[in-house]
Image (cartoon, grey):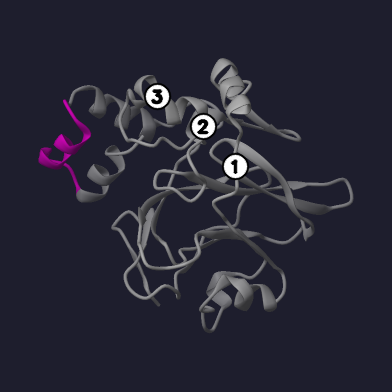
Amino acid sequence: ANVCMDPSCTQATRVESFANGLCFSHRPLEPGQIFLVEIEEKELGWCGHLRVGLTAHDPRSLGVVPEYSLPDLVNMGDSWVFAITRSHNRVTEERAAARVRGFLSGPYLIIEQVRIPRDKLVGRSRPGRYSHILDDLYKSNVLPATARKSRIGVLFTLQPDGTADMHIVINGEDMGPSARGLPGARPLYAVIDIFASTKSVRIIQVEYGFPSLQTLCRMAIQKHIIHRLAIDGLNLPPVLKNFCKYE
């Protein structure tokens, strides 16, 4: 009830209050497919942060969208949602230094049989093509889980017994199985609750193999402009402009 979508339907913003910010993926996820969002805006004055998870309920079948993911949606059954806190993804200085040397121990995040390019998963504390060269927060991956520009994703992996494990990924780090025994044979939708101090989130596109034609076109456009905000002056449809502004 309090969510406004941008024209591309990839950014969701809670426009008032602190609740009624529940969103779902448009389609069910495939096994191993991460649904990744970046925190775009924060709002002071509220306690609590983003909540993420999975649900076996088809969002279109919900007569009324619950006000909260926790506890309302979870109490309906067949939904698994967790609150993201400041302590998630917290690392010591020693671990941070080790990650700088190994860039999070490799270019891919590996969860069971799933390989995901890690560079898309890591939140940057400042936007910009070269911020990773200048920004120590990005290099050491110590961006707080609830901070602006933090990237949080959810996925599930199938198990030999036919069930599924849910994993939450925060800034390139797998938090481990957050829930087990999910019904792997049923469609599972991503749940994003834009709750309290989290005001706006944006979907981050993750490609597992070769870049799509859409991404190659975006890279060509970005290559020939001075700054991404200059895209606003191009003679392009608004949806394409919005897509081209981001990585």
Q: Earlier in the sequence, mark 1 or mark 3?
A: 1
The answer to whether the residues at label 2 and label 3 have Cβ atoms under 8 Å apart is no
- Image height check: is 44 above or below 108? below
Q: How far across and how far down the image is residue 166, in percent?
A: 71, 52
Q: What residue type is labelled 1?
A: Asn
The label number, if any, that marks residue 89 in the structure image: 1
Tell me which numbered mark, 2 or 1, is placed earlier along the sequence.
1
Query: Which residue occupies 30% across, 30% down?
Result: 128
Residue 86 in the image: above or below residue 131: below
> Does dot 1 land on a helix, a strand or a loop?
loop
SS at mark 2? loop
Q: Can residue 107 be seen in this view?
A: no
Q: Are marks 2 and 1 in contact (CB under 8 Å)?
A: yes
Disc 1 to disc 3, C-alpha distance: 19 Å
- Cα gap from disc 2 to disc 3, whole angstroms: 10 Å
Neighbour tally class for label 3: few under 14, some 14-19, many 20 plus, Cα within 10 Å:
some
Residue 53 relative to residue 12: left or right: right
Residue carrying label 3: 132
For the magenta stretch, what is the residue range?
Answer: 226-237
Q: Sequence-wise, which precedes: disc 2 or disc 3?
A: 3
Residue at mark 2: 141
Q: Position of residue 70 (x, y in %)?
A: 61, 72
Q: In which quarter of the image is the C terminus?
A: top left
User: Amino acid type of disc 3?
Assistant: His
Dividing the image into 4 quarters, which one contains the N terminus?
bottom left
